[in-house]
Amino acid sequence: MTMILRLHELFLNAIKQLDVVALPALRIYLAAVFWVAGMNKVNGFDQVVEWFGNPDWGLGLPFPWLMAFLATASEVAGAVLLTLGLATRYISVPLMITMLVAVFSVHWPYGWQAVADLQSAGATDATQEAITRLQRAREILQEHGNYDWLTDSGRYSFVVSNNGIEWGVTYFLMLAVLAFSGGGRWFSADYWIAKHFVRSADRV
């Protein structure tokens, strides 16, 4: 039993030395996501404003220009700051708010799943209908298209986007980790800034 506990302690001590990669990995992953989302909004800003404000086919949000600007600025600035690990906790908060707005205003009516899959949690009757439509689409492609080329021996497959809250919630939780834990050691500007001020305070 003592040997098992000793091995357990050695394992924890060894893996603890690698904890410096976890938070930077989260930051870089999210930075890529928000950079793409933000630049898409920059390149189609007028359409984003129209979508935010239109109550018939859009979100029907108040102050659509302001809302679109805040979302775009949060995502673009967020991508840059997360990459640098600068003001990580501060930028995580508006990005979390952006995710909450997306979850409740865009994705909530479609349930949990991001991609329709009967084997995943949160499958509904609508999921079954989506799978039925996907199968019909495959049959049409097999009959009228080059299906082998389209699927390339299984490397490419067709799915149905369910547009549920799954990815939005996942990004929100990842941002929450950064909001509570910061950008991590060594590989973040926050770490070195804090280290500098601690040293300066010690010299006073």
Image (spheres, rainbow, N blue to C red):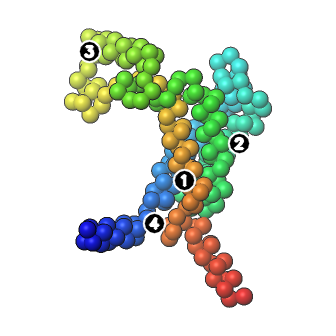
Are discs 4 and 3 less than 8 Å apart at CB?
Answer: no
> Of helix, strand and loop, which one carries label 4?
helix
Residue 61 or 6: which is nearer the viewer? 6
Camera-side mark, 1 or 2: 1
> Of helix, strand and loop, which one carries label 1?
helix
First reached walking from the N terminus: tag 4 or tag 3: 4
For residue 190, the mark is none
- Could one spot residue 39 in this view of the protein? no
Camera-side mark, 4 or 3: 4
State the quadrant of the C terminus: bottom right
**C-alpha gap between disc 1 and disc 2:** 22 Å
For residue 20, the mark is 4
Q: Residues within 10 Å of mark 2 (few under 14, many from 20)?
A: few
What amino acid is found at the position of numbered circle 2 in the picture? Leu
First reached walking from the N terminus: tag 4 or tag 1: 4
Residue position marked by numbered label 1 in the rendering:
177
Residue position marked by numbered label 2 in the rendering:
70
First reached walking from the N terminus: tag 1 or tag 2: 2
First reached walking from the N terminus: tag 1 or tag 3: 3
Horizontal side, residue 163 vs residue 180: left or right: left
**C-alpha gap between disc 4 and disc 1:** 14 Å
**C-alpha gap between disc 1 and disc 3:** 45 Å
* Residue 174 image offset from top left, x and y in percent: 52, 49
What amino acid is found at the position of numbered circle 3 in the picture? Gln
> Of helix, strand and loop, which one carries label 3?
helix
Query: Relative to 161, does residue 96 appear above or below in the rendering?
Result: below
* Residue 60 image offset from top left, x and y in percent: 71, 24
First reached walking from the N terminus: tag 2 or tag 4: 4
* Residue 130 image offset from top left, x and y in percent: 41, 17
Camera-side mark, 1 or 3: 1
Residue position marked by numbered label 3 in the rendering:
142
Residue at (45% x, 19% y) in the render = 124
